[in-house]
Amino acid sequence: MSRPTRRIAPRAATAITIAFLTLVPGVRPGMAETFAYVGNADSNDISVFKLAESGEMTPVQTAAFTGVDKPGSSTPLAITPDHRVLIAGVRSQPFLAVSFAIDPKTGQLSHIGNGPLADSMANIAADRGGKFLFSASYGGNKVALNPLSPNGVVAEPKQVIPTGLNAHAFLPSPDNRFVFATNLGSDQVLTFAFDAVAGTLTPSDPPVTKVPEKSGPRHFVFHPNGKFVYLVHELNGDVAAFSYEANSGAWDEIQRTTALPEGFSGKEPDKKPWAADIHITPDGRFLYASERTTNTLAGYKVDATSGKLTTIGSVPTEKQPRGFHIDPSGRYLAAVGELSDSMTVYAIDQSSGALAKLKSYPTGKKPNWVEFLSLP
């Protein structure tokens, strides 16, 4: 007579699994694998790195752009909300969006296909539902909306809308009801109402938020609580904080500070402010901006109640830091240098927000964009 099979209850099985994982060096229960993707304009490819718990980066792949010969001025990247597809914008003719499937286990990229963009696009972003791609053309003074095919390939533009001078960023609100376009040369931010079902954009009321003349609004980021927006200005190095009204999409400025390091006057003919990128930690406690003339990263503490910023200070970084990003854990920041062809990783002090340099890594040529992704 055979014995009945002993079954382990689900809770017991989970406990055994957790106990086992704690014995494996460097493994935490539920620990996700995190990857960094660097867009390289002159080599027309993406450098893929794996991020360790220690902040160490390991190169895992160089993904070339299939069907692209000429380099563009930059390589904007976007990852779909389902983490299945990475899209790269090509700024040489013919203007293309190159789509890659992301392997959920290895983080590596496999080319899916190319789709048309309306112009040379300085910035691309998926809508929150992952069905459309927004893009902004600096030289073409326009923004566009392209549907995304189910496999992640970009379809023909559905809407192309003229803007003021030098459209630079075109990103959706946290609830996907509005899309905002910075016009660097016209010192304004345009607001569009977005119908995510129909996939249509219409000018909002009011349609324009003005910023100071010759400030050059460039990139912006929402606070994770959805109540504030932070905007970096390329031409004067300002970082402005706005309260955000989710129902109307209105921005109301509450503070203005600078991304320029202490002691930098910006008055010399060959040393004008040239701010670039801005990002906030996932918990909303720290904000950072990059400045290209001084090759620095500026840090700020964020007051979650008022939205106001307190300057932490600046640290030196890669030469001409056009792009950087913060990993999903909020523990590390990676910045790339267009003129150094490399990436530096910093540890973010979890109490002060101060950046501590860890290590630098070679990338492709003219790196200008960083995206992080945790899988699964």
Image: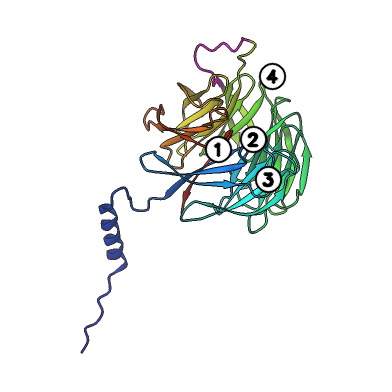
Give yes or no for contact between labels 3 and 4 (Cβ–Cβ under 8 Å).
Answer: no
Between the C-alphas of marks 4 and 1, the distance is 33 Å
Which numbered disc, 3 or 4, marks the residue closer to the eye? 3
Mark with earlier residue (2, 3): 3
| Residue under pointer 2 | 74
Please tell me whether residue 86 belongs to the stretch shown in magenta.
no
Q: 94 left or right of 51?
A: right
| Above-or-below relation of 302 to 144 | above
Specify the segment rendered in magenta: 256-268
2 or 3: mark nearer the eye: 3
Relative side of 29 to 234, left or right = left
Task: Label 3: state its secondary structure.
Answer: loop
State the SS at label 4.
loop
Relative side of 39 to 216, left or right: left
Query: Residue 68, which numbered label?
Result: 3
Dot 4 corresponds to which residue?
A: 214
Q: Which residue is mark 1?
A: 364
| Cα–Cα span, label 2 and label 1 | 12 Å
